[in-house]
Image (cartoon, grey):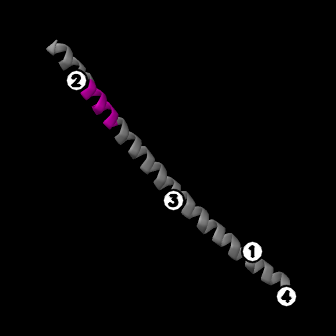
Amino acid sequence: MGSVIAVVLLIIAVAFVVGGIAGVVRFVRLRRFQRLDADYRAAALVCNARREVRAAQHREQRKV
């Protein structure tokens, strides 16, 4: 009876360890995606600002 409880506790402990490892891997992947997403958004913001400046210059040239 005692060995059955030990086996069950061992299986539960292994499940917690595997779940913890999976959580760490998931966190690392999420952080990598968030960093890439932030870089993409920053690049898009710069690109849109440059486009807006060019469009404003073009509008000013057409007024003359």
Crowd class of label 4 (few under 14; some 14 to 19; many from 20; radius 10 Å):
few
Crowd class of label 3 (few under 14; some 14 to 19; many from 20; radius 10 Å):
few
Cα distance in 3D space between marks 3 and 2? 45 Å
Q: Earlier in the sequence, mark 1 or mark 3?
A: 3
- Secondary structure type for disc 4: loop
- Point out residue 48 in the picture as x, y percentages from the top left corner: 65, 67
Q: Which residues are magenta?
A: 12-21
- Residue 17 within the segment the image draws in magenta: yes
Residue that mark 3 sits on:
39
Q: Earlier in the sequence, mark 3 or mark 4?
A: 3
12 and 30: which is toward the camera: 12
Q: Amino acid at mark 4?
A: Val
- Secondary structure type for disc 1: helix
Q: Amino acid at mark 2?
A: Leu
- Secondary structure type for disc 2: helix
- Residue 34 within the segment the image draws in magenta: no
Horizontal side, residue 13 vs residue 53: left or right: left
Q: Quadrant of the C terminus?
A: bottom right
Horizontal side, residue 64 vs residue 43: left or right: right
Q: Amino acid at mark 1?
A: Ala
Residue that mark 1 sits on:
55
Horizontal side, residue 63 vs residue 44: left or right: right
Crowd class of label 2 (few under 14; some 14 to 19; many from 20; radius 10 Å):
few
Q: Amino acid at mark 3?
A: Asp
Residue that mark 2 sits on:
9
* Point 26% across, 22% down: residue: 11
* Point 43% across, 44% down: residue: 29
